[in-house]
Image: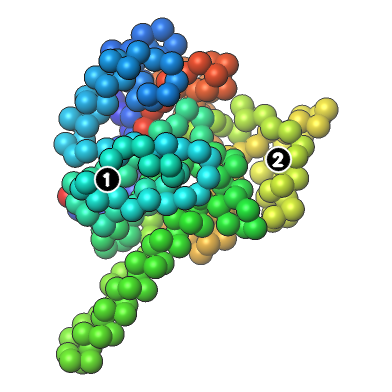
Amino acid sequence: MPWLTPVWPAPANVRAVCSTRDGGVSTGPYAGLNLGDHVGDQPSAVAHNRQCFAQALSVRPVFLQQVHGWNVVALSAHTPDGHTADVSASQEPGIACTVMVADCLPVLFTRADGAMVAAAHAGWRGLLGQGSYGVLEATFERFKLYAQSQLASVAINNVANVGRQTPPDDSVLAWLGPCIGPQAFEVGAEVREAFVQDDSACNALFCALGGGKFLADLAGLARHRLQRLGFSLAHIHGNDGSAAWCTVSNPSQFFSHRRDLGVSGRFAASIWRV
């Protein structure tokens, strides 16, 4: 299927994919592979589409109840769908961290050694968060906690085996998927002000339209937040803000909540360990 496969230097045991509208049995405004079970589509069609998606992945995707927040749920083989969270993370193979979007930004993460993966749903509210802490910070914090636990384990082992153990590679890679583009994402002055108050450098990622309206670069804001967390440009991949990544501008490829006036399906981005 002509879905998107991230082009990034992920380790060999990590797989990732981002679906499009291609495939599926939904019709009307949901035509294609709609994976959202909360948007008004026929439940039987969504169930079929999700089954097709899982079969294509060859692992089970776990679908969240996303609320534009920054809660993180750790997945295991027995985790059911429906957890209220906007990030899922996993150290176990065979379970796919999955987020659904239709203008918001999906962000996939992996450790460079492939020991942990995560998927985050980043709309502007989750991206902004509160007190400089949002969905990307919450995800990266989970990776840092894992790295600290691994280093502690290495230190304990080194007491009995000095010089034989080395710390694991805890660098993290991020891939930004399709989202509403910088020429389509119109926001009010209050959204721009909230980001600029948090970080004045964000001003460059808004373009004034007049009348208190601005165009916002959602993917650019995410890249900036990741760099602020310490990600180098070499560790951030995917969406560069060009038209090909814009959900609004590509109706045959992507669902878009804003373009379709709130009646739209959802596509998904997933990442998992094998």
- Residue 192 as seen in the image, left or right of residue 140: right
The correct choice, above or below, for 258 with respect to 242 in the image is above
Amino acid type assigned to the residue bearing label 2 in the image: Val
Judge whether residue 2 can be spotted in this image: yes
- The residues bearing labels 2 and 1 have C-alpha atoms spaced at a distance of 35 Å
Residue 9 locus on image (x, y percent): 31, 53
Q: At x 42% / y 24%, what residue is drawn?
A: 38
- Residue 218 as seen in the image, left or right of residue 207: left
Q: At x 75% / y 39%, what residue is drawn?
A: 190
Element type where label 2 sits in the image: helix
The correct choice, above or below, for 141 with respect to 56 in the image is below
- Residue 148 as seen in the image, left or right of residue 249: left
User: Which residue in the structure is indicated by mark 1?
Assistant: 79
User: Which residue in the structure is indicated by mark 2?
Assistant: 191
Judge whether residue 23 can be spotted in this image: no
Q: At x 39% / y 62%, what residue is drawn?
A: 143
Density class for disc 1 (Cα within 10 Å; few <14, some 14-19, many ≥20) is few
